[in-house]
Image (cartoon, rainbow, N blue to C red):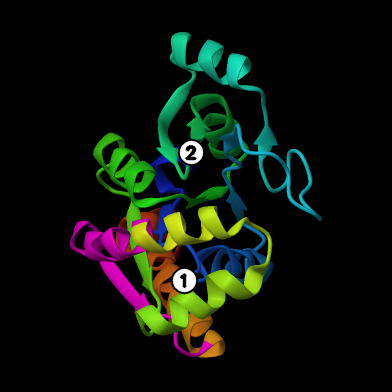
Amino acid sequence: MSQQESSILMVISAPSGAGKTTLAKALLGRYEDLRICVSHTTRPPRAGDVHGKDYYFVSHDKFDEMVANEAFLEWAHVHDQRYGTSHAELQKLRSEGYSVLFDVDYQGGISIMKAYPDAVSVFIQPPSLKELDQRIRNRATDSPEIINRRLENAKFEMTQYPHYQYAIINDDLESAIDAIESIYRAEKQKTARMESEIKTIVLG
């Protein structure tokens, strides 16, 4: 199995406010062989956002150009903005030997799973709609209109979990981090990914 074939592609999706980005960052902090596939977006940067680390922030015209050039593995409209995962970003990370984490909405997640059926998929659920409402409102980063739209969209997004292999209810952050780490750790130990190391032992 080649280095690229043995790398793990892990998709994390969730309704807005469920905590997928927090879980993604926690997992990335525990594994040096795992990298986030940074998405492109047309949304404006928020306070603390770093271009090339959190997102590649691009204009609508640039995004249109990338769509026309088929530069995206997947892209979607989310809350009046567009987000996309580029082929180039994914191939760069895989060629460097990294496993790849996708922090995407359910539309992007489903597209990635169709393109890569062996991708590991995890859906993060909030403990309740009431808790989700509080988390989104406590962010204080969006207008009331956008907050209400996110909440309405979240009700539908929460129903998309059957598309995913694993589900985590994020009612306790540390437990949720442990759960997602256990999924990644188990995937690393699959026989197909351990084959070269096992052959070295068996063949001496």
Residue 136 visible in this rendered orientation of the protein: yes
Q: Is residue 49 left or right of 81 when viewed as pictured?
A: right
- Residue name at image x 73 percent, y 39 percent: 52
Residue 4: x and y in percent read 47, 39
Q: Is residue 161 magenta?
A: yes
Q: Of 195 and 8, which appears nearest the observer?
A: 8
Three-letter amino acid code at the position of disc 2? Asp
Residue 11: x and y in percent read 41, 54
Residue 197 visible in this rendered orientation of the protein: no
Label 2 crowd bin: few (<14), some (14–19), many (20+), radius 10 Å = few
Q: What residue is disc 2 on?
A: 80
C-alpha span from label 2 to label 1: 19 Å
- Residue name at image x 63 percent, y 75 percent: 138
Q: Of 202 and 187, which appears nearest the observer?
A: 187
Q: Is residue 85 above or below residue 11?
A: above
Q: Quadrant of the C terminus?
A: bottom left
Label 1 crowd bin: few (<14), some (14–19), many (20+), radius 10 Å = many
Q: Of 150 and 124, which appears nearest the observer?
A: 150
Q: How many marks?
A: 2
Q: Which contiguous range is marked in magenta?
A: 153-172
Q: Quadrant of the N terminus?
A: top left
Q: What residue is disc 1 on?
A: 18
